[in-house]
Image (cartoon, rainbow, N blue to C red):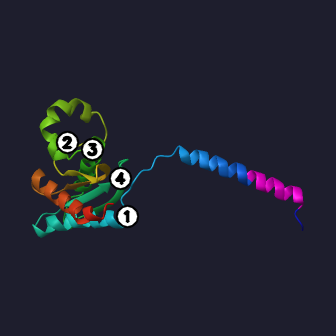
């Protein structure tokens, strides 16, 4: 069955309208850099491996700038609670665009605000990830016997991918 010339003209017109609407819509979009799945998995793997090498059962979670989980690893023999703690540390870090260890001295002042918001955990082990000056995510680590150790393992995860965040 042949398509009439007027039908082709209508299809062309709709295509042109759709294309211009797409262009107008695209102009209103914000560019949101996100860490690739491959790098996110490398980072959490390196964080968990760093702690495992020291004898600690650690979990690590990497979130994007919206706090959405990009990758997570529950280390061997780590408690189930470590996934939630690692997530909440990463979420807190990306929310405030700061490492959670640096925020701990202010925890008393922020306590009222933070305890009312879901997934906020002002405990060391959340490390913000930047590409240049732009925050692109955060990694949280939990399970080691001390916040400083959690933070060191999270930083090991960031260090594993930092040179490729461009």
Whether residue 12 is situated above or below residue 76 in the rendered picture = above
Residue at 62 percent across and 50 percent down: it is 22
Residue matched to label 2: 122
Local SS, label 1: helix
Q: Earlier in the sequence, mark 2 or mark 4?
A: 4
Q: Nearer the viewer, mark 1 or mark 3?
A: 3
Q: State the separation of the CA atoms marked 2 and 1.
A: 26 Å
Q: Residue at x 39, y 54 (%)?
A: 33
Q: Which mark is residue 37?
A: 1
User: What span is colored magenta in the figure?
Assistant: 4-14
Q: Earlier in the sequence, mark 1 or mark 3?
A: 1
Q: Residues within 10 Å of mark 3 (few under 14, many from 20)?
A: many
User: Predominant secondary structure in magenta?
Assistant: helix
Question: Which residue is painted at 15% across and 32% down in the image?
Answer: 108
Mark in front: 3 vs 2: 3
Q: Callout 4: helix, strand or loop? A: loop
Q: Earlier in the sequence, mark 3 or mark 2?
A: 3
Decide whether residue 6 is among the magenta residues. Answer: yes
């Amino acid at each position: 069955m042949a398509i009439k010339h007027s039908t082709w003209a209508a299809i062309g017109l709709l295509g042109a309208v759709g294309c211009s609407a797409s262009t107008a819509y695209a102009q209103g979009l914000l560019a949101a850099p996100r860490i690739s799945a491959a790098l996110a998995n490398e980072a959490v793997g390196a964080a968990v491996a760093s702690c495992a090498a020291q004898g600690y059962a650690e979990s690590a979670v990497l979130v994007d700038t919206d706090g959405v989980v990009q990758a997570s690893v529950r280390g061997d023999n780590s408690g189930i609670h470590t996934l939630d703690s690692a997530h909440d540390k990463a979420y807190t870090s990306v929310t405030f665009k700061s490492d959670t260890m640096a925020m701990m001295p202010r925890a008393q002042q922020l306590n009222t605000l933070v305890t009312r918001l879901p997934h906020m955990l002002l405990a060391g082990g959340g490390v913000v990830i930047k590409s240049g000056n732009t925050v692109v995510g955060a990694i949280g680590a939990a399970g080691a016997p001390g916040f400083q150790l959690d933070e060191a393992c999270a930083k090991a995860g960031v260090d594993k991918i930092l040179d490729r965040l461009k």
